[in-house]
Every structure is written in C-alpha cells, then in structure tokens.
Amino acid sequence: MLEISLDQESPLSWPHQIYRQIRSAVMAGGLRNGDSLPPAGELARRLTVPEESVGTAYAWMGAEGVLECRNGAPARIRTGARGEHRAGEPVAPLGFWADLPRPPSRLNATPAHDFRAGVPDTRLFPTDTWLRLLTEETAAMPPRLLVYDDPRGNADLRASIAARLRRSRGLEAGAAEVLVTNGAQQAVHLAARVLLRPGDRVAVENPGYPPARQLFTSLGAEPVGVRVDAQGLVVDEIPDDCRLVHVTPAHQFPLGTAMSLRRKLELLEWARRRGAAIVEDDYDSELKFTERPLEPLHSLCPDGRVVYVGSFSKVMLPMLRLGFLVAPPALMPALAKARYLTDVCTPSVEQAALARFLAGGGFAAHLRGLLAEYGARRELLTDVLTRDFGDVLTLVPSEAGLHVTARAEHDMWPLVQAARRAGIWLYSLGDFTDPPNSAHGLLFGYTAMPAGAIEAGLRKLRGIHDRKGRK
C-alpha cells in the first residue's frame, strides 16, 4: 500500500509533497510498472486534504509519463516507466581538477598586518563617486542594453581604454582592437582558447603566476616553466616547439623585475622565427614609481604577435572584475566569439560607469592619489627591510606594482607559517615556483594597510624570525 505522510511545517504545498513521495516510491522500486494508486478522492480523504491536491499531483505524474490516468479506471504506474533506481558511482572530475589546490578563500578576518601581494587598500577607492556613476548609468541605460551587451564590450569604454593606453603606456591601438573582460584572468583564458590546441606547449615564467599555468593545463596545453633572471624571461631557454609565451614584462610576478629592452627584442624575434604568439600580462604597471618608460612588448611588435592584457582590479577594486585585452585585428572575431560562448558579456552598467570614470578624469585623479600614498608606503617598507632584515633578505629591484620581493638563502616557509599564526599575512617566494619551494624568499605587499601597520608588522616579523633562530 502506498504510504504518504504530509508535513504541516513543510514549505512545500500538498500537491508537491504528494508528488515527491509518489516519485520517490517509483524511483526506489516500492511502486512498479502496473501498480495501481488509490483514486484521488480516496487518497484525499485518507490524507485529509482537498481532492484537488491529489488530482494535481496525479496530473503532474501523468504529464511526466509516469502515471496513466483514464476515466473510470484506477491510476496506474505506466508500463515502461523506469523501475528501481540503484545508486552507482557518482560522476567525478578529470584528475587534473581533483589535483588542483582549492581557490583561495576570503580570510575570516582582516589580518592585523596584511602583506598579501596584489591587495589594494579599498579605503582609498572613491566609493561615493562610483556609486553615483552607477546610479546615473542605471537610470539612463537604454532598455536594449539592460538585456545583453556586445561581447566585445561597451563602445565608449573600449575607446576610453584605448585612449588611456596611448597616454600611459604608449600603446597604439584603436577601440576596435580592445575587448572588455571580467578581469585579466578571463582575458588570458580567451587568448589561450583561440590560440592553443590540446597538446600545444606554452612557455610560462618560473617563478610565475600559478593560476595562469593551471589555466593552460585545464585547456589541454602543456605549460613549460622557463627561468627568469635579472633581465626577465630567459629567451634562450624557451623550447622551440612552444606555440605561446605568457610573460609579465613590466613587473614580473612574483620577482618584480622589469624585462630589459634587449630581452624584449629577443623574445619578439624568437616568436617571429617560431610563428608563436605572446600574451603580455600587464597586470599592475599603472602603479609605476619611476619616470623611466616601461615599454610594452605590444608597442614594439609591428607584426601582430602580442595579445596585451590589462586589469582595473589593482587600481580600483578586485570585486568589480573589470579587465581588457588588446589584440591584433585578425584575432578579434575569434575572441569575440569565444567571449560570447564563455559568458556573453560584462555587465553593461559597470562598463558605462567606468567609461565615464576614465573619460571624465576621475580615474586619473584616483591614480595620482594612489601613487602618492602607495609610494610613501613602498619607501617605508623598503627602508625598514633594508635596515632590519639586511642580514636575512636581499631586495629584488622593482619599479612598479603593489609588492616587492626579497630573496633569502634559506627556506622561508616555516617563518611564513609562524607569521600567519601571529596575524601577519605574507607569501613565500617558493609558493610561485615549479616545483614548489625551489627558490627562497618573501613577497611583501604594501597596499592593503596604512604605514603604521607596515612598520609594526615588520618589527613583529623580525621578532618571530629571531625567536625561531634561537630554537
């Protein structure tokens, strides 16, 4: 006999509860093909619910082909319905995904001394201005743009990005060569999708940015780590069969060095000879602390081999997820198609607000304020590291970005672990090498906290180091 019990506290309606319990009985084998169900009126009286509730549940089962209801005949489990459902092995991801480390999660609390790399000080962002722009653009947005936008991005924003790049980076590209993305990571992903085949080899910096290396692997490509020295990626060590090279020439991640002009020209010549492409990841070079120009690879390459990637995450807010790429015209149709297949487009209102923020001078004013504040913090950090850690760490020269790196003679991971337990959050250089921990040093971000917390955190870190040394 069919057993159904209704829960007065359930948020589900009577028809939903009846339907689900009949369906579960069929799936479990308690009701088999040809078994009859009580008439709707009889079951309704038994459950003390309106007959209409049972009739609705039966109708739903009939619409799914599980229940056969004929006038004057008992409702029966339909012949041919699936019988007992036996659990099997759950579907599993490919081994690559199971082996990947988990994405970093938000810290439960902001560390007292936050030296994480790439984390901007959100208190410096002009929130009121940004909210006003969002409100105005939402009110003025044409209905057609509140549905789906151009996969390439808002036309005004692409023009503003192109103009900004001409002024700040000397990069000659028009709006037609710009595609707006949800952050720099998506830009790299799109470039890889249209340039790589499964099995292709990709040269990546070592040490380098792990998510880029993992991204290429996820697409079926084979990333090959290439050594980085004081001039940047060592071009002579790139395997001849690499189809793509991913580099961070303006502010190498994680070392912070700038690729020399000589090395840039060597890389471009290598790519020309091999018929390879280059993804230039310019993730944080807007924050430049020198008058010396940091010439992009893109501006040195006349034959369209470089896809230039940029982001507003480090200068504005990471949660806005606004980035872009600049690509040769021959690639743009494929990139637009890949973007459409990935997630269609970037939200229209945020794009329109950013276009006004750029064109109206708000972005430039915000950047000037950041450079002044971050420059002071950077100077303090390097002065204290030189004074108090000179016997332990050697600073790597750097002219841009949101972090500095210091090399060490010994493994820094135990110190990093002890520091985190004490409320000091920082990274080991070995976190970014392949294999892990094959280089020693520390990364110090200086943008997530005020100057006072920087100096106090370094003083506390030195104390932890010295206590560990005495053990």
Image (cartoon, helix red, strand yellow):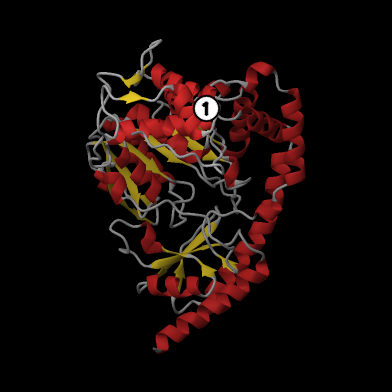
Residue with the most extreme bottom position:
470
Is 144 located above or below residue 280 in the figure?
above
Name the residue at 40% across, 44% down: 247
Front in this rendered view, residue 74 or 82? 74
Residue with the most extreme top position:
71
Residue neighbourhood size for the residue with mark 1, other residues' Cα within 10 Å, grouped as few (<14), some (14–19), many (≥20):
many
Is 177 located above or below residue 286 in the figure?
above
Front in this rendered view, residue 148 or 308? 148
Residue under pointer 1 = 179
Q: Give residue 211's position: percent from left, percent from top.
A: 39, 47
Instruction: State which quarter of the image contains the C terminus.
Output: bottom left
Q: Give residue 137's position: percent from left, percent from top.
A: 73, 28
Front in this rendered view, residue 132 or 246? 132
Name the residue at 40% across, 63% down: 429
Instruction: State which quarter of the image contains the N terminus.
Output: top left
Q: Quadrant of residue 59?
A: top left
Q: Quadrant of residue 361?
A: top right
Q: Quadrant of residue 156?
A: top right
Front in this rendered view, residue 456 or 50? 50
Q: Is residue 146 visible?
A: yes
Left or right of 76? Residue 299 is: right
Secondary element type, mark 1: strand
Q: Give residue 67's position: percent from left, percent from top.
A: 36, 20
Q: Give residue 266's position: percent from left, percent from top.
A: 34, 41
> Amino acid type of disc 1?
Leu
Circle count: 1
Q: Is residue 299 visible?
A: no
Is 307 located above or below residue 8 in the figure?
above
